[in-house]
Amino acid sequence: MFQIVKKIVTVIKIVNNWPAVLSDKLGFSVVTKYWIRTGQSFICRSKSSDINIVVELFSGAEYPKEYLRFSSKNQVVFDLGANIGAFSVYFDSLNKGVEYSGYSIEPEDQNFRLLIKNLSLNKVENFKPVKAAITRKDGEVFLNTHVKQSAVSVVETPTDAKVKSHKLSTFCRENMLDRVDILKMDVEGSEYDIIETDRDFFRSSVASMILEYHNISPEKNAQAAIKLLEKDFEVRSVRKSKKGGVLYCVNRNL
């Protein structure tokens, strides 16, 4: 009961038109437009986790604010697994008046359409939306879309959802980027392969990272993520649960 009350209080603190959450969760509307008390707005799908993600971000529970502020201009941020744009909008709200470049990368069709709408709704111009997946290879990959929209993942088995894929190093080279200052990665289990196959680029070019890891197997879990990174990054645990958690990583070489 305490946890339920705590969640309700958090929603009321963050969302101006918080009574709309009830009709949203009951499915009385297809989409709901929410107004955040700090001035942002979001279009969210009914009976989805969209508004949950927005509330988690704007409460600071998901990613601490101190890890998301640029200290100088002309820095670069990536939002991998951008979903409907909650992180991109939140990040922009923390860096108002700062000149920076951002990339919101999301492979799934419905998510990407809402991402564009929410960036436009909040007049976020520093983030460029990109419909693609960052994975372990260049070319194309398949997506498992038979899950909730926040859990769409890259799979090896062919599906009816095929999207363009880039290694992070390739994408940066093609866009003439020699450094990523803040990399947020929430890619539903692909994080291990992305880092493993692009280790040299992470070592030489990624200054800091907010990594959402997923406990998938004995080979892919918190310990595996830390082992992949600890040689080149100082790794701090931000939060953890049975399903996964968040690590904040700072490159020792940059």
Image: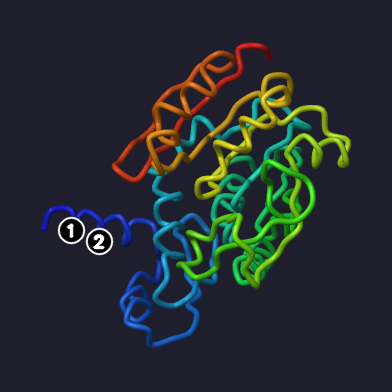
**What is the x, y in percent for residue 15?**
40, 63
**Whole-number angstrom distance, CA of label 1 to CA of label 2:** 5 Å
- Which residue appears at 38% of the width and 41% of the height? 244
Give the amino acid at mark 2: Ile
Is 71 in front, or is 254?
Answer: 254
Residue 237 is left or right of residue 30, and the answer is left
Residue 207, by quadrant, is top right
Above or below: residue 69 compared with residue 252? below
- Which residue appears at 74% of the width and 52% of the height? 165
Query: Under tag 1, what secondary structure?
Result: helix
Is 28 in front, or is 147?
Answer: 147
Residue 232, by quadrant, is top right
| Colouring used for the render | rainbow
Q: Residue furthest front?
A: 157
Q: In the rendered view of the protein, which quadrant contains the C terminus?
A: top right
Above or below: residue 12 compared with residue 44? above
Residue at the spot of label 2: 8
Residue at the spot of label 1: 5
- Which residue appears at 73% of the width and 38% of the height? 168
**What is the x, y in percent for residue 61?**
37, 43
Query: Under tag 2, what secondary structure?
Result: helix
Give the amino acid at mark 1: Val
Q: Are marks 1 and 2 in contact (CB under 8 Å)?
A: yes
Q: Residue furthest left?
A: 1
Residue 113, by quadrant, is bottom right
- Which residue appears at 40% of the width and 26% of the height? 223
Q: In the rendered view of the protein, which quadrant contains the N terminus?
A: bottom left
